[in-house]
Image (spheres, rainbow, N blue to C red):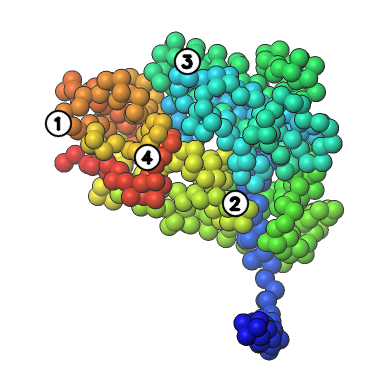
Amino acid sequence: MILKHLASKLMVAAAALCIALPAQAQETPKPEQVAEQAYLYGLQQAIYYGQRWAYTQNDSKDNIVYTGVNRFSWVRKQITPDYPVVTPNATTLYGAGMLDLRDGPVVIEVPEITDRYFSVQVMDQYGIFRMIVGSPFNGTAAHKYILVPPNFTGDVPADFPTTEIVQWPSLTAYAVARMAVVTGTDADIKTINGYQDETTITPLADWLKNDNKGIAQADRQIVKGDFLIPDGLPEYQFGQVDKQTAEQYFTLLSVILNDPTMPTLTDSIMEAEILKQLEVFNIGKGLSFDWAKLTAEQQTALETGFKAGFDSVRKTLETSLINMNGWGVVRNDGGFETHWMDRAIIADAAWAAPDKNISHGGAFLFLDSDGKPFNGKNKYTMTFDVNDLPPVTQFWSIPIYDANGYFVANEINRYTVNSFMLAAGDFVVKDGKLVIYIQNEKPTDPEQAKNWLPAPADGFRFTARYYGPYAPLVNGTYNMPKVVLTK
């Protein structure tokens, strides 16, 4: 009884305090502040929109990824310098494509793959990977998965256990498949190509007509996407935000917010607040944004906020990296619904990278052990202790790129060093040490030549990948080898 009386008095006192304390008035953000926040909020979605157009609608001859809806655009040979993608990984073959769920569920089937790492991951427009499956996650047996869109009223076939039914929050999705290149021989690539042919994306209606089986991609016609696009979209420089204008960005954001395939989150106070604030520029659902009809002050505010957002993303990427003995590890803890800066950083630096490091992680290196930029005129070494290699459940890979992030041709066609090469005996190991020689010209010493990682003639950089990373590779406590200038 005494406890009940005390609790009652405390509740009354708490209520009195709530009444006594005035609510703190929130300041109305300035237009340029709204624009800057809108950049952080929408960058991922904007790049998604451009990628969807490239995969499903841009059927120009020079577009290597065009494949229509509900199909993978496969990389069917090991990546070399002729592949026009920034910071590629030559230790996996990729497949990626856009799913269209407007006509109902889509079925993804993956064959049994027992001889290598593989994964299939599916991302929504916010960069959140809501489906991550494959050898490290649910084994090597064949699986089939069904993505069910909102408000679907039909029945899910009895073939699917509940663990393989994915309730999807929108009518669009991005799927990416990865399969490890173990040796890179013709036979190895041919094996992967066979797995690619058996990995299918099939609309449920077609899947049912095909006796509850996926239809091989070679047997399906390309279906071009018909998603909303802004006027002049091909000039929007998708994925190259440093070339995009404020007018293009906010025009695209307006289109996105009016696209029924990309609904906003149903329970985000943060998102609702920014969307309300954007209405001052006539950006929002049901609104018609027209840059030419804005006042000069409004245009200036959008331009100022756009630049501030761009600059803050680039600066935060540099300052927020976890220092792993000189290598910069991206903070990638998820929460993309509300962590807009994290979402924008991944979108800008490595669009479609997982929102959490449960699949694979990465680390950047731009400077040598003396803190100076790399130069192909110099010679460097990177030394591993073979008893203390990067701790992974799958494999690690360290590619080398030019200063802009592209592979550069070399006489031995080697663009990376990785754990598969070490396991195969491709390197010389002495006294428990693996020394990688990084230089433009081939070493004259035969043993050094065997451990040679050819460097571009001018500036270069690294972006390491760790598949199945242990905690030290995520929190930065692993003693990753530095790249040391040979003096």
Q: CA distance from mark 1 to mark 2?
A: 45 Å
Which SS class for mark 3?
Answer: helix
Q: Nearer the viewer, mark 1 or mark 4?
A: 1
Could you tell me the amino acid type at mark 1?
Asp
Q: Which mark is residue 189?
A: 3
Q: Quadrant where the N terminus lies?
A: bottom right
User: Vertically, is 273 above or below 420?
Assistant: below
Residue 23, picture quadrant: bottom right
Which residue lies at the image location 67% right of the left edge and 76% below the top edge?
Answer: 27
Query: On the picture, is 69 further left or further right than 455?
Result: right
Say which label, 1 or 4, has the lower sequence index.
1
Front position among marks 1 and 3: 1
Q: Earlier in the sequence, mark 2 or mark 4?
A: 2
Disc 2: which residue:
336
Q: CA distance from mark 2 to mark 3?
A: 35 Å
The residue sitting at the front extreme is 1
